[in-house]
Image (cartoon, rainbow, N blue to C red):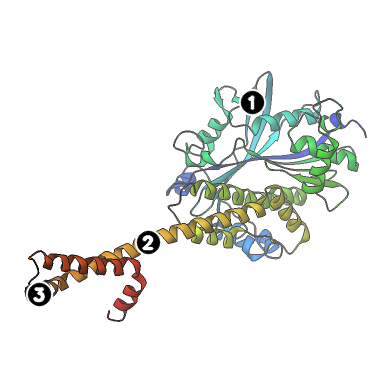
């Protein structure tokens, strides 16, 4: 295998993805601050109609506000320098997108370009940039002396914080931003080089790690495991890998023409956003069932019916990517485990609710029975006088009768309920 660390990157895509909280007026505030509702061209709308299944298309690729998931966008074209340790990275923010999921949270993406200097290896510069921009607090924005995450919150999220005390999202947003990467190389990449590049970029490891012989280099077994389970490819000129925090495609002549760039930047990226949302929302469900107080079965059922899409396209490649993303994010297993857990909790909540209903029914029945005490009292007095029992005998008869009624009410509530329903 050739030493690929000095290979030339002709073109690249780099997006980071994160989550943020939504409040009632967020969309209105965002539009007032400079965002616009995202619109597709008529040609794109016609293309998506024949490309994605209706369930997926209704979420993301209809026109403007017709989408269930509203998308806001702006193109700041802003260049800045991020400092991390002894490194200074110049990046350009090309586009910012906000995806507003109804009755949930929002997801943002920043489309970035790295200023690759020919004085240093391209791969090393891109790797450094990926390492820094995926971290919440690692890099400082030069000239502002604020963290990368704080810069994003202030500049693009209208101050809506994503981390910190009292921020529910911080419980399940993870430890870093997610990365979407596509690299088009000048040199022809053979299969071994594609595999090595995918490992280095997907694991955000220093270039050359995959072929290193040092003691901390990945084992052949681990690299094989990643290739077998998380790689995908349909053509010889490119190959991809999806892991928990990264989605990477490397190849030759994959970002040469506008339609190719759109395919990666829009079509495949929307699939990535969709699966990330499912994963984040599953995290949200898990944090919501820490006690046995709420039955989430209806909410989970509605969520799965809308978003848990296995097959999304009439084309084989988007569906293949979708299935690989689901595998790398372990969505199937988590849905199965969460469904079982929520069903068990729902059964407990339902049982407790039934117990409360039975108790209330018993109390109502007991109160209703109080009106019958006066005849019992008169009858008990007559029995006491007839048999010349002591005066307290009438009280014993009343108490015994009351205990019998209460026992019947509390141990046979269903029969009481059926009896009452016949007369109401």
Instruction: Give the Cα separation between the discs numbered 2 and 3.
Output: 43 Å
Q: Which mark is residue 81?
A: 1
- Quadrant (top left, top right, bottom left, bottom right) of the N terminus: top right
Residue beneath disc 2:
355
Is residue 400 visible to us here?
yes
Labelled pair 2, 3 in contact (Cβ < 8 Å): no
Q: Which mark is residue 387?
A: 3
Secondary element type, mark 3: loop
Is 273 above or below relative to 4? below
For the point 64% across and 26% down, the residue is: 81
Instruction: Give the Cα separation between the discs numbered 2 and 1.
Output: 62 Å
Is 104 above or below relative to 145? below
Secondary element type, mark 1: strand
Q: Which mark is residue 217?
A: none
Query: Tag 1 or tag 2, which sits nearer the N-term?
Result: 1
Locate residue 243: give its quadrant.
top right
Closest to the camera, between mark 2 and mark 3, is 3
| Nearest to the observer: residue 42 or residue 307 | 307
């Amino acid at each position: 295998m050739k030493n690929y660390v000095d290979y030339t990157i002709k073109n690249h895509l780099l997006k980071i993805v994160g989550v943020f909280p939504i409040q009632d007026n967020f969309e209105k505030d965002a539009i007032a601050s400079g965002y616009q509702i995202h619109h597709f061209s008529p040609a794109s709308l016609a293309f998506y109609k024949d490309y994605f299944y209706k369930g997926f298309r209704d979420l993301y690729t209809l026109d403007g506000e017709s989408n269930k998931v509203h998308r806001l966008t702006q193109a700041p074209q802003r260049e800045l320098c991020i400092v991390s340790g002894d490194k200074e990275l110049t990046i350009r923010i090309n586009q910012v997108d906000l995806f507003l999921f109804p009755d949930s949270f929002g997801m943002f993406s920043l489309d970035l370009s790295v200023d690759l200097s020919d004085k240093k290896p391209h791969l090393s510069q891109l790797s450094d940039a990926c390492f820094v921009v995926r971290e919440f607090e690692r890099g400082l924005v030069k000239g502002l002396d604020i963290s990368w995450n704080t810069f994003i919150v202030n500049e693009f999220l209208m101050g809506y914080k994503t981390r910190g005390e009292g921020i529910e999202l911080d419980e399940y947003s993870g430890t870093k931003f997610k990365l979407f990467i596509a690299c088009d190389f000048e040199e022809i990449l053979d299969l071994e080089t594609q595999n090595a590049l995918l490992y280095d970029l997907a694991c955000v490891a220093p270039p050359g790690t995959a072929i290193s012989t040092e003691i901390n280099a990945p084992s052949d077994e681990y690299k094989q495991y990643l290739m077998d389970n998380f790689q995908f490819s349909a053509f010889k000129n490119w190959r991809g890998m999806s892991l928990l925090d990264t989605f990477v495609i490397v190849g030759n002549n994959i970002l040469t023409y506008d339609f190719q760039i759109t395919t990666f930047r829009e079509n495949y990226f929307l699939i990535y956003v969709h699966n990330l949302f499912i994963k984040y929302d599953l995290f949200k469900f898990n944090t919501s069932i820490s006690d046995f107080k709420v039955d989430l079965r209806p909410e989970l059922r509605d969520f799965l019916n809308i978003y848990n899409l296995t097959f999304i396209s009439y084309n084989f490649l988007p569906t293949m990517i979708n299935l690989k993303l689901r595998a790398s994010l372990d969505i199937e297993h988590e849905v199965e485990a969460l469904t079982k857990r929520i069903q068990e909790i729902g059964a407990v909540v339902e049982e407790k609710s039934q117990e409360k209903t039975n108790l209330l029914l018993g109390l109502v029945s007991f109160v209703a029975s109080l009106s019958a005490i006066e005849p019992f009292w008169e009858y008990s007095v007559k029995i006491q006088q007839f048999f010349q029992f002591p005066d307290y005998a009438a009280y014993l008869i009343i108490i015994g009768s009351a205990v019998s009624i209460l026992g019947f009410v509390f141990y046979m509530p269903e029969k009481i309920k059926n009896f009452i329903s016949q007369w109401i």
